[in-house]
Image (spheres, helix red, strand yellow):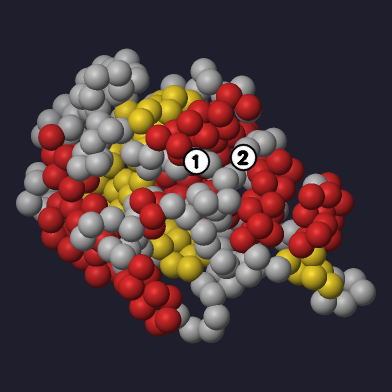
Amino acid sequence: MIMSELIEPGKRSRSASPSSFKKRARVDHPDADSSCIQLYNLPDEISYRALAEKYPELKPYLVAESSQRSTLDFKNPDAVRVLNQALLSTYFDLHIHLPSNSLCPTIANRLNYLKWLSANILPDYIPGHLTGLDIGTGASCIYPLLGARYLPQCDFVGTDINEDSVTIASCNVDQNELQSRIKVFLNTDRLTTLPLTTPGFPLPETDADGASFAFCMCNPPFYENIDERQRLRQMKRGTPSLNTTAKDDELYTDGGEESFLSRLVDESAIHNRRIKWFTTMVGKKSTLSILKTKLRGVGVKQVREGVLIQGRTTRWVLAWSFYAQVLSAVEFGISVLLWKGRGLESGDAKLKLLG
């Protein structure tokens, strides 16, 4: 479930409402107000055989289950890579290079994060031009590229600490002629998650409230080391269906995701007016609880959270803002949004207002 709440839900904010925020009495379905979503989205069902007809490079990786049905060899990392390229090409008109040694993103999972932002964060803004910051964009530059298609009102800045990843990400942006909407920046300080004051950082113009970014997003390294990764994978039922290859800095970080995201919370307090909504994916529910406790100590005004389920993978989304909301959660009830994704489906959203 996804819960949208104020830290102090019983109190009405006395401060003037931020000029770019609008009153929101409900959270709209992510498909409600964007014509672009109708153009670029994943279908509810995908036939690998039909997809391979449109993208022939996929054919060598098909495995026949019957005369009428084929599946894919998901244990082959090349098959997963080509599948993602086929999905991006067929449904999003995106053509990208995915190196064999870089993290191969699951398209439906990434799209669900963008859908969550569309449903729970973007409705706070008066319609207009927005910019998002992607922390750890990777060689694929997947969130900015998908976001450029799915969220037509948003431009992006993507950062990464790996020079090779930044080079390839920039090439992927150029290949899709999205240079005017996506900038990629090399963060040379591994201990800084938000390099907003680093010389050369492409900081967008500020809005009327002094903010440069409407939101930031992050898909952090989830593990401290390979031992933690293997232990957590063994705790899951069944055999993992995907064979994942990635650079070490895409999977591992000192102290694991808790340490990485704790730094993000600390830095968000420093840049509390430059980014209106800080958001991140969280891989462990225990980390989610720790972060929510930490947020209460840095003076945030709003916290929202959600869960994204894609196949057997569950991820949480945590969002916080130092800007006050116009109306309290008590007055308009608490919004509960259930997101589910099955297989390659794009995710279903069901909304219910309580209170």
**Relative to 158, residue 226 above or below:** below
**Residue 40 spot, x, y in % from top left:** 65, 40
Crowd class of label 1 (few under 14; some 14 to 19; many from 20; radius 10 Å): many
Task: Determine which of the numbered discs, if any, sits on residue 154 in the image.
Answer: none
Q: Give x and y (percent) for residue 141.
A: 50, 38
CB under 8 Å between discs 2 and 1: yes
**x 48%, y 31%: residue:** 167
Task: Give the amino acid at mark 1.
Answer: Ala
Name the residue type under label 2. Answer: His
Q: Quadrant of residue 210?
A: top left
Is residue 42 left or right of 186 when viewed as pictured?
right
- Residue 52 image-quadrant placement: bottom right
Q: Nearer the viewer, residue 160 or 292?
A: 160
Residue 336 placement: quadrant: bottom left
187 displayed left or right of 93: left
Secondary element at tag 2: loop
Residue at the right extreme of this rendering? 67
Residue that label 1 marks:
139
| SS at circle 1 | loop
Answer yes or no: is residue 62 visible.
Answer: yes
Residue at coordinates 61% horizontally, 22% vertically from top-left? 177
Distance (Cα) linking label 2 and label 1: 8 Å
Q: Residue at x 20, y 42 (%)?
A: 191
137 relative to 20, above or below: below
Q: Nearer the viewer, residue 57 or 107?
A: 57
Residue 66: percent from left, percent from top: 87, 77
- Badge 2 crowding class, 10 Å Cα cut-off, few under 14, some 14 to 19, many 20 or more, is some
Q: Is residue 90 left or right of residue 276?
A: right
Residue for badge 2: 97
